[in-house]
Image: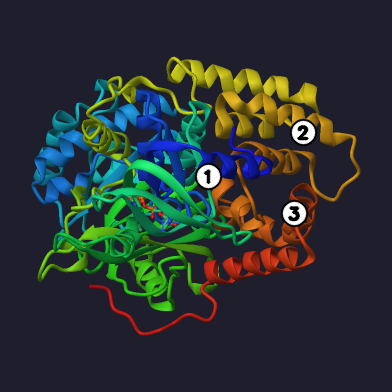
């Protein structure tokens, strides 16, 4: 449904149809809105100026979480809402989210003590409606050490153990978009809204879009337009008439990735940094990742990068909480940086600005949504589409159905069924010439779409190639089903390899570019440019050549 090879056809649709709704932005917010709207019966187009999820939605801490930090700020309503949403997001995409028990150690003089941790997590369980088996446990200091021997023993008083959900933000976005496309939404990446068109009453009637890949320029007609461009919402609003004084304050957060051989973290931990901020350290396969920072940001939103200072700050936090771990700068294999689109609040520090979402509408009818979390994307979309639907006096649309709508690849009744599915697919993989573990990984990543990959891999085993058959199958799937246009799309947003397996990216970057070039018929110039782009992303992930002065505020 989202085949890169079908772009010309989708572009033609964009030009020929009059859509009920045009969504600007293909991050999780835009994807959620497109899905909600199309399943209520609206005709929907979505355009994204980069790759899907290339903005903040591939650069988060990758947790679908109930927002414990809001509890610290006594924002009870957000805790209750995000807690409930967490469960819904999880059930609808079991292959992209998985429960991850989080350890919250407390030390003498730290942010939390035994009483505050216990009361806080108890309130969290209640407010967020946490399932019985996932409710918090309180641990003694010995139990904490048993669970994670690397935790600082000095001053350790105990810990709390509670459940968060780990996800892959870019894949979550992709699965929502694929579902929206399956239901009829016309989605295009690398398609930028340049300016808006208006009718004779001065109301929005569409937008002029620019194909970033081939330079085509044309108009898309739509009755309603939603601006879901995250860190870019102000820029897009400037293309329209700005009719209120709300604006964004961007803050940057970075993560670092370290190999388990150096940092053998067993247990996800939410801990105090020396300056009192809370930091996550999360095991993921053979790696551990640590984040995040929170600093004001006014630079290039398309390529935010970690600086040496950011990395040093996180390493200091690791040294502080895990004193026996001898990690230093050379062990940081990869990094990523994301920009939070927060709503400006006078005089507040970066970490104090609320993460809540807000919707506002201009006099011309442009609906803008900003702020919020990955976790709340479905609910946010419901609220936005309720508002969009009200703008049609002559059309009736159905109610919101996304609460029980499985995302693409997530057609499972429950967790048990998903686990059994992974095992049976691991066994079946062998029949397709795929190793059992690879089969299990593919099933866990692509869910009920995995058969397509198995068939691709099987077909590829006969072909002589430097690329492993499974890697080729993943490329084919990304191109034919997920509109991957460039090797960076594949290695960053479709697989996450740039962050969690950078060695693989370095090893195969030329061969993957060659293969994609054959599939997508790149010109010689495009092929060179895309390879160079990937190499630049590798450099950025390794924090090369970027170290301007900067302080954590
Ligand atoms: C460091 C960090 C950690 C985070 N951790 C978490 C977490 O663990 N859990 C959680 O729930 N949330 C987390 N968040 C928040 C979450 O990631 C964001 O709220 C969410 O990804 C925002 O999605 P979005 O779709 O609104 O924005 P984006 O993902 O940025 O999408 C907006 C898109 O609009 C596109 N665009 C811009 N201008 C145009 C135009 N003119 N035409 C077409 N397209 C355009 C951009 O290219 C971009 O892809 C974190 C955020 C950060 C920065």
Mark in the foreground, 1 or 2: 1
If you read the primary sequence from the N terminus, does the residue marked by circle 2 or circle 3 appear first?
2
Q: Is residue 170 visible?
A: yes
> Seen from this angle, which residue lies furthest bottom?
549
What distance separates the C-alpha of mark 1 from that of mark 2?
36 Å
Residue depicted at 62% across the width and 47% down the height: 484
Q: Residue at x 60, y 66 (%)?
A: 538
**Which quarter of the figure is the C terminus placed in?**
bottom left
**Where does residue 231 sit, x and y in percent of width and height?**
33, 60
465 or 178: nearer the viewer: 178
Q: Is mark 1 within 8 Å of ligand 1?
A: no
Give the residue number, with chain letter if any, for mark 1: 15
Left or right, 456 with respect to 380, comes to right
Q: Secondary structure at mark 1?
A: helix
What residue sits right under mark 2 in the picture?
457
Residue 271 in which image quadrant: bottom left
Q: In the visual, does 523 lie left or right of 233?
A: right
Q: Residues within 10 Å of mark 3 (few under 14, many from 20)?
A: many
In the image as oriented, which residue stretches furthest toward the front? 200
- The residue located at (66%, 56%) in the rendering is 487
Question: Number of labelled discs?
Answer: 3
Identify the disc placed on residue 249. none
- Mark on residue 512? 3
């Amino acid at each position: 449904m989202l085949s890169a090879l079908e772009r010309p056809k989708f572009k033609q649709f964009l030009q020929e149809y009059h859509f009920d709704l045009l969504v600007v932005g293909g991050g999780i917010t835009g994807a959620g809105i497109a899905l909600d709207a199309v399943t209520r019966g609206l005709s929907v187009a979505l355009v994204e100026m980069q790759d899907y999820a290339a903005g903040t939605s591939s650069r988060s801490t990758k947790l679908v979480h109930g927002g414990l930090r809001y509890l610290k700020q006594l924002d009870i309503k957000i805790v209750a809402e995000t807690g409930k949403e967490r469960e819904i997001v999880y059930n609808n995409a079991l292959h992209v989210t998985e429960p991850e028990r989080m350890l919250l150690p407390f030390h003498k003089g730290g942010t939390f003590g035994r009483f505050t941790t216990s009361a806080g997590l108890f309130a969290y369980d209640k407010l967020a409606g946490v399932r019985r088996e996932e409710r918090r446990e309180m641990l003694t200091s010995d139990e904490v050490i048993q669970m994670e021997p690397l935790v600082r023993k000095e001053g350790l008083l105990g810990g709390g153990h509670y459940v968060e959900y780990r996800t892959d933000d870019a894949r979550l976005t992709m699965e929502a978009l694929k579902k929206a496309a399956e239901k009829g939404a016309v989605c295009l990446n690398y398609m930028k809204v340049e300016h808006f068109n208006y009718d004779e009453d001065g109301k929005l009637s569409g937008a002029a879009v620019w194909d970033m890949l081939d330079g085509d320029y044309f108009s898309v007609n739509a009755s309603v337009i939603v601006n879901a461009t995250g860190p870019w919402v102000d820029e897009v609003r400037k293309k329209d008439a700005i009719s209120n004084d709300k604006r964004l304050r961007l803050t940057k957060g970075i993560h670092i990735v370290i190999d388990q051989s150096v940092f053998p973290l067993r247990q996800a931990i939410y801990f105090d940094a020396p300056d009192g901020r809370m930091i996550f350290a999360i095991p993921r396969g053979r790696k551990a990742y640590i984040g995040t920072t929170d600093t004001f940001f006014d630079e290039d939103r398309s390529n935010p990068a970690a600086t040496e200072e950011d990395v040093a700050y996180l390493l200091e936090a690791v040294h502080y909480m895990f004193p026996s771990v001898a990690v230093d700068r050379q062990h940081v294999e990869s990094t990523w940086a994301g920009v939070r689109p927060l709503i400006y609040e006078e005089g507040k520090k970066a970490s104090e600005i609320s993460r809540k979402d807000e919707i506002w509408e201009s006099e011309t009818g442009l609906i803008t949504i900003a702020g919020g979390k990955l976790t709340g994307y479905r609910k946010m979309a419901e609220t936005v589409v309720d508002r969009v639907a009200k703008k049609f006096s002559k059309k009736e649309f159905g109610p919101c159905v996304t609460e029980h709508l499985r995302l693409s690849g997530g057609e499972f009744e429950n967790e048990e069924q998903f686990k059994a599915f992974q095992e049976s697919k691991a066994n079946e993989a062998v029949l397709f010439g795929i190793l059992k573990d690879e089969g299990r990984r593919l099933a866990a990543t692509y869910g009920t779409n995995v058969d397509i990959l198995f068939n691709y891999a099987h077909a590829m085993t006969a072909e002589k190639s430097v690329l492993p058959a499974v890697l080729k199958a993943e490329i084919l799937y990304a191109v034919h089903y997920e509109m991957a246009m460039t090797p960076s799309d594949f290695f960053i947003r479709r697989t996450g390899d740039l962050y969690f397996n950078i060695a693989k990216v370095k090893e195969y970057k030329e061969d993957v570019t060659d293969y994609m070039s054959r599939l997508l018929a790149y010109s010689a110039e495009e092929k060179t440019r895309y390879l160079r782009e990937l190499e630049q992303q590798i450099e950025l992930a390794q924090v090369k050549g970027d170290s301007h002065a900067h302080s954590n505020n």
